[in-house]
Image (cartoon, rainbow, N blue to C red):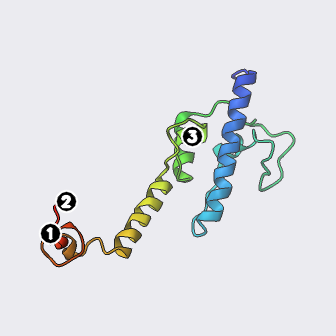
Amino acid sequence: MPQRTRARNDRIIALAKAINQRRLEFGARYTSEVFKRDGAVSRILENDPDYTPHRPRKIDKSRRPVVNPGIFTVKDIADRLHTTVGSLLGETGFEITIDDRRRMRDFITFLSQRFALNDPLLDDEGGGGVGPAASGRKG
């Protein structure tokens, strides 16, 4: 079994806290989806002192909280939470998640519709619209 050093202990606690926080946010944001806490998730979450299991734990349980989860396990959890492994690990440069991209796409669609950006008059050089072409000025 891997030894628990102070640095490793801090990292697994930080990962557990990040997963727990994303899990709570997921439940609030995706009311039609359920994030299932399977054994792997529960064994990671047990490292978070603030985590409350959904059912009481046995005192003499055979499996202890995980101290070094596999990358594929963390990747699966991140995918199910609609986030990235880098975000769960607190790495910089990975703050943009798939949900962020979806929200941006929806916002761009909203702006495109709101400002009629697909209007053919926008592409018409002499089409009587407002702007440099209509006023006789060059761009």
Q: Is residue 100 left or right of residue 112?
A: right
Q: Residue at the location (65% across, 62% down)?
A: 27
Q: Residue furthest right?
A: 59
In the structure shown, which secondary structural element does the residue marked by tag 2 occupy?
Answer: loop
Which amino acid does the dot numbered 3 rest on?
Answer: Val
**Residue 109 against residue 42 in the figure, above or below:** below
Mark 2, mark 1: which one is toward the viewer? 1
Mark 1, mark 3: which one is toward the viewer? 1
Which amino acid does the dot numbered 1 rest on?
Answer: Gly
Mark 1, residue position: 136
Q: Is residue 115 left or right of residue 55?
A: left
Numbered mark located on residue 74 in the image: 3
Disc 2 crowd rating (10 Å Cα; few below 14, some 14-19, many 20+) is few
Q: Residue at the location (77% across, 48% down)?
A: 51
Numbered mark located on residue 139 in the image: 2
Q: Residue at the location (41% across, 71% down)?
A: 110
Q: Position of residue 72 (x, y in %)?
A: 52, 38
In the structure shown, which secondary structural element does the residue marked by tag 3 occupy?
Answer: helix
